[in-house]
Image: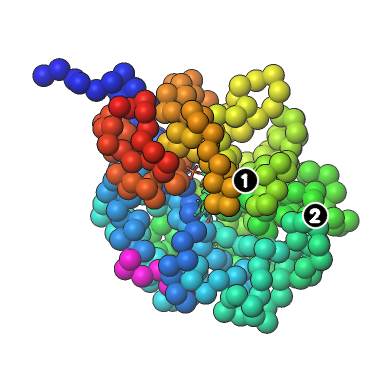
Amino acid sequence: MTDSRTTTGKRAERLLARPYAINGLELRNRVVMAPMTREFSPGGIPGEDVAAYYARRAAGGVGLIVTEGAYIGHESTWASRKVPRLHGEEQLAGWKRAVDAVHAAGGRIAAQLWHVGATRDPWTGPVPDADVLSPSGIDLAGAPKGRAMTQADIDAVVAAFAASAADAERVGFDGVEIHGAHGYLVDEFLWAGTNHRTDAYGGDLRSRTRFAAEVAAAVRAAVSPEFPVLFRFSQWKGGAYDARLADTPERLEQLLAPLADAGVDAFHASTRRYWLPEFDGSDLNLAGWTKKLTGKPVISVGSVGLDREFTGPQGMSFKPGATGIDKLLDRMENDEFDLIAVGRSLIADPDWPGKVMRGDATAVFAIGQLQSLA
Ligand SMILES: Cc1cc2nc3c(=O)[nH]c(=O)nc-3n(C[C@H](O)[C@H](O)[C@H](O)COP(=O)(O)O)c2cc1C
């Protein structure tokens, strides 16, 4: 029988269907589901529908699911009544149901551990009296909000990250991802725009990384040695897409080295468009640089399967022809990074990974069909 698939379809299978292992955790392929907040868990309890949602993506062929951000067990992060928590008996029982369903569908699932920092508006959550906490008591725009964390706050939040990681392992998750990206608490420490501290947690980039490294070390110590600990970070922040933590590879290394030393097994470099070079003079994206600098497994992400650039719900502006899967496959062929996370395309079509790996041109993409498979 002749294989009627296009060259792209065959390459997609060859490159994306390769197994991969993170700290001994075997993944059946290179496609990761990106963490995406849903707010479908009243009381912080993921129900049957949440289990079915994740199991559906596992059945569609994704290798590793990273859950939507799940609140750790510290009231200062409980910004919504419907975001799931990794804390509390009922909440953990709900997660166990989701984990079991994903495993039954042949997938793997890691929990994303989330503290929202100064982005929280206390009145929207279940504990309006809890203080809004951040490194310097300012929001992403620099305006006063809540209060700066004391050492006791820092110790309590670090301990809460560790406790939720231990709970995640106990209910059967295959790993955890520390949410250190997008302007939430961990990132607020990393970024000079929100960290004006003059103690050991503020100052140069290495000092600003101290909190993140403490979280990573505490999480590492709270779980088994073989349990994968991932760390997600980004240059961009919510509402500040041009923000940068590191403007040279040397500075990026200052950020990543202490995290690798603290026991992070894999990095998830969050970019909005995976094809953009991170620094002048090289085509490598942020994930590519992260792999080069740390030698650790790295996940890339950003507009995979979106065949036009998309700049947000208000603007709804599309730039034609920005990306196709061929450019992604080129980078995977070069081993620039190890895994690719897919977000919106996996909401649009739960069967996206299987279809793309089979070269099936009916794969639905978040914005239109992907031309290069057709
Ligand atoms: C609805 C939605 C919710 C998101 N929630 C999270 C989240 O909880 N944690 C996180 O790290 N990133 C979150 N993101 C960012 C995604 O993980 C991903 O990086 C981004 O959507 C780019 O990937 P894509 O172009 O494949 O969608 C969210 C994105 C979307 C669209």
Mark 2 burial class by Cα count in 10 Å: few <14, some 14-19, many 20+? many
Q: Amino acid at mark 2?
A: Asn
Q: Secondary structure at mark 1?
A: strand
Q: Residue at x 73, y 49 (%)?
A: 190
Q: Quadrant of the C terminus?
A: top left
Ligand 1 closer than 8 Å to label 2 CB: no
Region of the chain picked out in magenta, as a range: 44-49
Q: Is residue 171 magenta?
A: no
Mark 1 burial class by Cα count in 10 Å: few <14, some 14-19, many 20+? many
Residue 188: image quadrant is: bottom right
Q: Amino acid at mark 1?
A: Phe
**Where is residue 182 drawn, in percent x and y?**
63, 51
Answer above or below: position of 241 versus 170: above
Q: Residue at x 85, y 57 (%)?
A: 197
Residue occupied by mark 1: 233
Q: Residue at x 65, y 20 (%)?
A: 282
